[in-house]
Amino acid sequence: MNEILQAVLQRRAVKVFAPVEIPEEIRDQILNAARHAPSSFNTQPYRFYWVQTAKEKTAVAKLCLGQMPAETASALVVAVADIGSLAATSQGQLEWMRTRSEFSEATIRDYERAAKISRILFTPGPLGVFGAVKWGVLWLLNLWKVMGMPPLFRQDLFKWATKSTSLACENLMIAAEALGINTCPMEGFDSRRLSRYLGLSSRYHEIVMVIAIGKKSPTYLEPPQWRRPLEATVTIL
Ligand SMILES: Cc1cc2nc3c(=O)[nH]c(=O)nc-3n(C[C@H](O)[C@H](O)[C@H](O)COP(=O)(O)O)c2cc1C
């Protein structure tokens, strides 16, 4: 079988890990694979916190409700949707484009203009007032024009960023699997306390999931894997 497909099909949410260290090189490969996931407008609106020291891991595992995968993992990855990173990201991409001969001055100018427009579209403003105004205008426009709605309010922005963050998480888990490392995604955690522990801002950051990482314990037996039948999850038109 194709190696990538094999990693996808054999990945399981592992609940008990063996006490082994993840080599730095493997860690970096896993994190690098995560950031290669596709993201909306290539904004990569996330930050991963890789928690590996014993002290930090114990504290974070406790905030993951003391779940077994968290308690036994070699590392815990906290995946955070970060809507405060957008301006710096487009600035970074712009600077990168300026160093590349493939991009003409006109392409760079177009990108700069598009980045400015999306900044306006993606800014909810104080108390979401600007978002409400934009919503009204776009709603009227949508009455006669086929168009997509950008995320207008802070909660929409977090939902939007969560999609790209989740794709990066899946990349991370498949890459780990391909490298012989097991994972368990978790949404069982105390979001408020974990955010405070990591020094996150509720204005810009939302924890999407925590991924426990390590080598499956030899004593752990996975239950058989069940999935809904294909026809229950797919509509072919
Ligand atoms: C968003 C999300 C949240 C999850 N949260 C937890 C969790 O808090 N604790 C846990 O043990 N497993 C958690 N899981 C793992 C699921 O239980 C597991 O993926 C599912 O039962 C299917 O098993 P499999 O991944 O081995 O096929 C979560 C999975 C996802 C995708």
Image: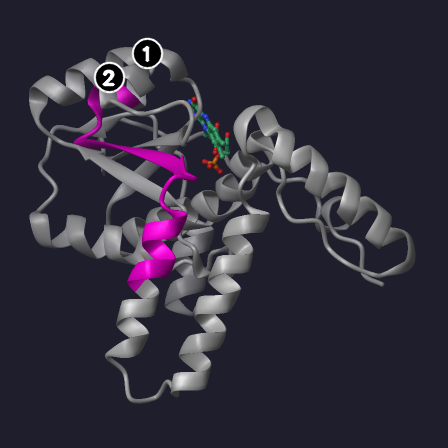
In percent of width and height, residue 7 lies at 38, 56
Question: Where 3 sits versus 76, above or below?
Answer: below
Instruction: Please give the name of the residue rendered at 28% of the width and 40% of the height, measured from the top-left corner.
Output: 48
Circles 1 and 2: CB atoms closer than 8 Å: yes
Instruction: Please give the name of the residue rendered at 30% of the width and 25% of the height, measured from the top-left corner.
Output: 200
- Tell me the kind of residue under disc 1: Arg
User: How many marks are shown on the rendered structure?
Assistant: 2
In percent of width and height, residue 202 lies at 40, 22
Q: Distance between the residues labelled 1 and 2?
A: 6 Å
Image: magenta residue range:
70-92
Task: Classify 10 Å Cα crowding around label 2: few (below 14), some (14-19), many (20 and above).
Answer: few
Residue 61 among magenta residues:
no
The answer to which of 29 and 176 lies nearer the viewer is 29
Instruction: Please give the name of the residue rendered at 80% of the width and 54% of the height, measured from the top-left corner.
Output: 235
The answer to which of 229 and 154 lies nearer the viewer is 154
In percent of width and height, residue 23 lies at 8, 47
Disc 2 under 8 Å from ligand 1? The reply is no
Q: Determine the secondary structure under disc 1.
A: helix
Q: Name the residue under label 1.
A: 193
The answer to which of 89 and 207 lies nearer the viewer is 89
Locate residue 183 relative to residue 75 in the image: left or right.
Answer: right
- Tell me the kind of residue under disc 2: Tyr
Note whether residue 142 is visible. Answer: yes
Disc 1 under 8 Å from ligand 1? The reply is no
